[in-house]
Image (cartoon, coloured by chain):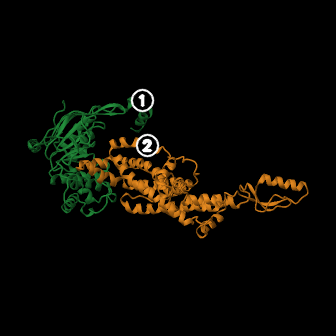
Chain colours: A green, B orange
Amino acid sequence: MSHPPLAQSPAVAARFAALHARPIILEAEHLTCEFDSERGRVTALRDINVRIHRREIVCVIGPSGCGKSTFARVIAGLQPVSAGRILVDGKPVTAPGPDRGMVFQGYTLFPWLTLAQNVRFGLDMQGRAQSPADAEARQWLDLVGLGKFADSFPHQLSGGMKQRVAIARALAAGPKILLMDEPFGALDPNTRAQMQTHLMEIWRNVDITIVFITHDMDEAILLADRILVLKAHPGEVIDFLEVPVPRPRSLAQFNTPEFQATRRHLDALIHPTPRTPSEHLPITRLTQVGDDVE
Amino acid sequence: MPLLSVRREPPARYRWLLWVVAFALPLVVWSAVSYVPWLWHPQVLVTDPGSVSWIQPGLRLERADFSEQVAQATAANLVPPRGEPANPLYLPPPHAVGRALYGAFTTAPRLKGDKWLHESLVMSIKTIFYGFLLSSVFALPLGIICGSYPALSRMTEPFVDFVRYMPAPAFGALMVAIFGIHLEPKVAIVFLGTFFTQVLVTAGTVRRVDPALIEAAQTLGAKRGHLVRRVILPASLPDLYNDTRILIGCAWTYLVVAEVVGVSSGITFFINQQAKYRNFDNVYAAILIIGFIGLATDQLLSFIGARLFGWKLTRRSRLRALLGWLFSARNVLYSPGKPSAKS
């Protein structure tokens, strides 16, 4: 790759050295995923090789159609691979399992269950006894700040609250990896910012590796240790960069040079060609309006 | 907000009123045709035969025939017959049907051995109840399994679809041969009429369960059996309940054919008998009673459903109830000899 790595402060460099020394929890080997669509055979992912360490947050970013959602679904075991394989803790993935939790973009809480029952679902599937499972579910709800809504139903909640419960539900099942497929994509900007902060808080308290799919560069820089950048048609890795912004992160870091440098770097990767100047556009109105106003 | 807005519910205070209008409007049309003498009234009810020997008071003549008689009598310098405009016997005015509604329950049957109206109704409800219960007991589990496992659906549904196209009444004689002439063959016809449709409808509803819910459950460690019992079943239950409500209307369709199989019985027998005596006001009364039963059942089930599945926030739909009513009323009008056009 021709992209130079982003400059890191010594503290950040030391942190990444420690991170790379951690055991590998998730590994993609020559992962290829193709499927048939109306427009013929589509290669959603081609020859993806990625290693993710324990307790790392990896954001996957790229233009629409780059297969970033497919990547999460393949890791979850919801989508079969065409070639290559996924290893979780050294064991190949063949089907969905409770070691990989997932939070979806749409709301997938079970509407007929209370929040406590929703969060308990994974524990019930593991055959855990009623009362300890219930107590544990309530603790997870406390963790996401919704303990007092334990006996409410999902339709009584706002979108942000639903996603918090979805996170609690996924974590309660005891996964090693938490897959998040644009989980805050449907939320308004304020709620989304709150959720990002909240997610980092949860991550600080829980032993969990997060693979976070997003199309929002700022969200990726704010959350990620490393950002996996994919390109579309076919979905291939174009960069796997280390974010030089120091932790603990907050929205206040947006104007730091590290943040902005990462942003420029990502922007160049994702939008490589500069926009056509408007005077070359064959739309007369556009150019004339520009001339009059400026 | 204007009352007529595209895809926008009217204000709550109008909804009750609109419900009343839904029923009042047909009644107004019916009353107008019955009571306004220059609307339709294609016949003349003779009040005074005059000099025409073959005409009796109370006879109904076509208007053209009557004018001809008047013209002939006038030409011959005889007393012309007199009469008033009337509708055919098969369209009794609302008050006659109202009287019949009341009278139907208080009048003893004309022939000894015939049944009172309420006894006929009990017979009909029994037939529907057993037929529909039996159908649901088998069709719901089969439909849920077919909807959950595509392989089983491919193995089952082509045959079910094939049988569904055979009109249930065609099995009438067969059912009598197998089950005798009393309640059993009738229940069997209602069963045959509903079962196959119910399997397909149930499977279709189960298939519409949001796949994201199933995937979420899978990532939480749910395996095959758990997915069906803990996700697919509860997720589709409110819709299955509504399907059942609609399919009860379907069962009424087959009741009418079922009741002429073997020993004729139930509300259909009552209707046919009354039609034979040309008591059309009683016929309408019986049809209306079926409508009322349908509407009441549907509203009751809707009321229970809204409480059972409160988490889904199902709104009570009076429109659907009204459709159900129209549907069941129409079914009674199927002539028993014709195989049903449905199915």
Report in which chain the residue with disc 1 lies.
A
Image quarter where the N terminus of chain A lies is top left
Q: Nearer the viewer, residue B319 or B224?
A: B224
Examine the image and state in which quarter residue A271 appears. Answer: top left
Left or right side of A142 for B73: right
Q: Secondary structure at mark 1?
A: loop
The percent coordinates of residue A253 (x first, y second) are 20, 48
- In the image, B198 versus B8, the foreground residue is B198
Residue B161 disc label: 2
Q: Is residue B174 left or right of residue A90?
A: right
Q: How many marks?
A: 2
Q: Looking at the picture, how far across and down is residue B131, in whole percent?
A: 45, 56
For the point 26% across and 59% down, which residue is it? A117
Q: Is residue A7 visible?
A: yes
Report the mark closest to the observer, 2 or 1: 2
Spot the residue most to the right. B77
Query: Which labelled disc corresponds to residue A282?
Result: 1
Q: x%, y% of residue B342?
A: 52, 47
Between marks 2 and 1, how big is the CA–CA gap? Answer: 57 Å
Whether the residues at callouts 2 and 1 have beta carbons within 8 Å, the answer is no
Residue neighbourhood size for the residue with mark 2, other residues' Cα within 10 Å, grouped as few (<14), some (14–19), many (≥20)? some
**Amino acid type at mark 2:** Asp
Look at label 1 and name its amino acid. Answer: Pro
The 10 Å Cα crowd at callout 1, few under 14, some 14 to 19, many 20 or more, is: few
